[in-house]
Amino acid sequence: MALSSVAAAALLTTLKAAVGLLTGSLGILSEAAHSGLDLVAAVITYTSVRLADKPADPKHPFGHGKVEHLSAFVQTGLLAVTSVWIVVEAIRRLFISGSHVATSGWAFAVLALSILIDTFRSRALWRVAVQYRSQALEADALHFSTDVWSTSAVVLGLVLVSIGATARVPWLQNADPLAALLVAGVTLYVGTRLGNRTVGALMDAAPEGVSERIAEAAAKVPGVLEVERVRARQSGNRLFADLRLVLESNIPFEHAQSVVDRVEGAIHELYPAADVVADAVPDMPSRRDLVQRVRSIAHRENFQIHDVTVFETRGRIKVDLDLEVDPNIRFTEAHDRATELERAIRGALPEIDEVNVHIEPLPRRVETAREATRIRAQLERRILEIARKLPGVVNCHSVEVHQIGRALLATVHCTLQPDLSVTRVHDITEELELRVREEFRHGVKVSIHPEPATGRDAQ
């Protein structure tokens, strides 16, 4: 497409220059100059499009798309130079040397051919420019579309000159330089618009409306609390977007990555070829939320913890938590890790008076288990008896008992009243586990899966 523009521009430049010299029409000569610059611009466009298609390399990690903007900038400069020359020459003819134009059928034929070619080429280039988001091809399309209007102005000027010569109206001879001034005005207007966009792209200005649309799409993704920053820039036909997302504090890294992936997917739905980089930062917990602040400190220092309890007694605030450590390290090393965590929490939260850390081995292997068939019936019967006496429990089912090493693991599904709070459900399951362990003292661990009761369960 760019190469065909070169051929079209070369043909029109040659024809307009020849007819302009034969007739002495400044309008046609200005059109020839305009087409000549279009020829140069088309060559630049052809070269820039080829360079912009080159893949990224170590020296150009963002690709070569900026070549297109540079091409459009050069074309803008050429349009400005052409316009200045036309204005100067038109003023000279209007006020100094006068205008003498000899119209002919060849002039009108060449201009009609020019309008036909420019109309076809501008529409074809515009379709391709939109399809491939190419600013260089868009600049070429703008050139050809303005040529249609400017050539039409020249045709009108020549018609008025012919009428003036036939009707012996001398002042109509000025229609030709006036038409040239109109060509210059149109060229400057289009060149200014293109130049503003080109300079903006070269200066990494955000494309109009893009940052807002990206921020809106990212904010709709579940898990995103705030879109703190959006930076977008255009390089050739490719959009680069850089985001900073605020996510909930203390969520697992895998979940944070999942949210980021969904944000990138949402942006790609808007801009399929966009290069998106999203950075996630945690939301800072409220100063009043000591539990979350303790978790944040532990996670920031790369400690794996659970069962965090913060309580106040006799005016002193204490923290109890479980610290998971590698089961194969020595106890002294594990104790040092616990001490390091205590210091980090108390250093960051001076309002906490005491930190108690319970050390637990972090499971790293799959345990071998076998069904404990002998005790299963007894355990199942007793679990059901205890559960029926607990307020809020509707039913228990699917009891399984496995022997893992020397310990027994009993798993049971319990349906509870659906309107209970999570805290109340936790208290009920804790009570059930405690009572079972009290009766079966030979190492029974109870794992209860709570489920909200439905109408069928109530029956």
Image (cartoon, rainbow, N blue to C red):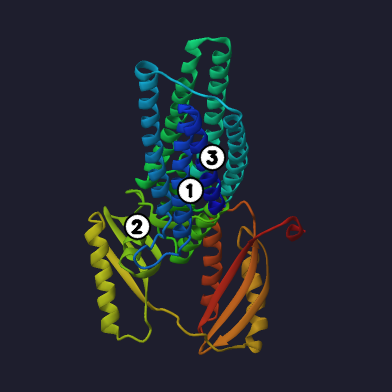
- Position in image of residue 147 (x %, y %): 53, 34
Name the residue beneath numbered marker 1.
42
Lower sequence index among marks 1 and 2: 1
> Compared with residue 300, is residue 100 higher up or lower down, i.e. above or below?
above
Question: Badges 1 and 2: C-beta atoms under 8 Å apart?
Answer: no
Given residues 235 and 23, the one toward you in this image is 23
- Is 198 on the left-hand or right-hand side of 134? left
Q: Does any portion of residue 411 appear in the rendered image?
A: yes
Given residues 264 and 303, the one toward you in this image is 264
> Compared with residue 36, is residue 453 higher up or lower down, i.e. above or below?
below
Q: Which of marks 3 and 2 is in front?
A: 3
Q: How far apart are marks 3 and 2 (CA)?
A: 91 Å
Name the residue beneath numbered marker 3.
15
Find numbered disc 2 in the image and state the secondary structure of the residue it sits on.
Answer: strand
> Looking at the rendering, which quadrant does residue 123 occupy?
top right
> Looking at the rendering, which quadrant does residue 425 occupy?
bottom right
> Type of residue at label 3?
Leu
Q: Distance between the residues labelled 1 and 2?
A: 75 Å
> Looking at the rendering, which quadrant does residue 110 occupy?
top right
Q: Residue at x 54, y 81 (%)?
A: 440
- Category of crowding for the residue at label 1, using alpha-carbon neighbours closer than 10 angstroms: few (below 14), some (14–19), many (at least 20): many
- Position in image of residue 144 (x %, y %): 54, 39
> Compared with residue 229, is residue 193 higher up or lower down, i.e. above or below?
above
> Type of residue at label 2?
Phe
- Position in image of residue 57 (x %, y %): 39, 67
- Position in image of residue 240 (x %, y %): 44, 53
Q: Which of marks 1 and 2 is in front?
A: 1
Specify the label residue 240 is tagged with: none
Name the residue beneath numbered marker 2.
311
Q: Which residue is drawn at 49% across and 52% down?
A: 237
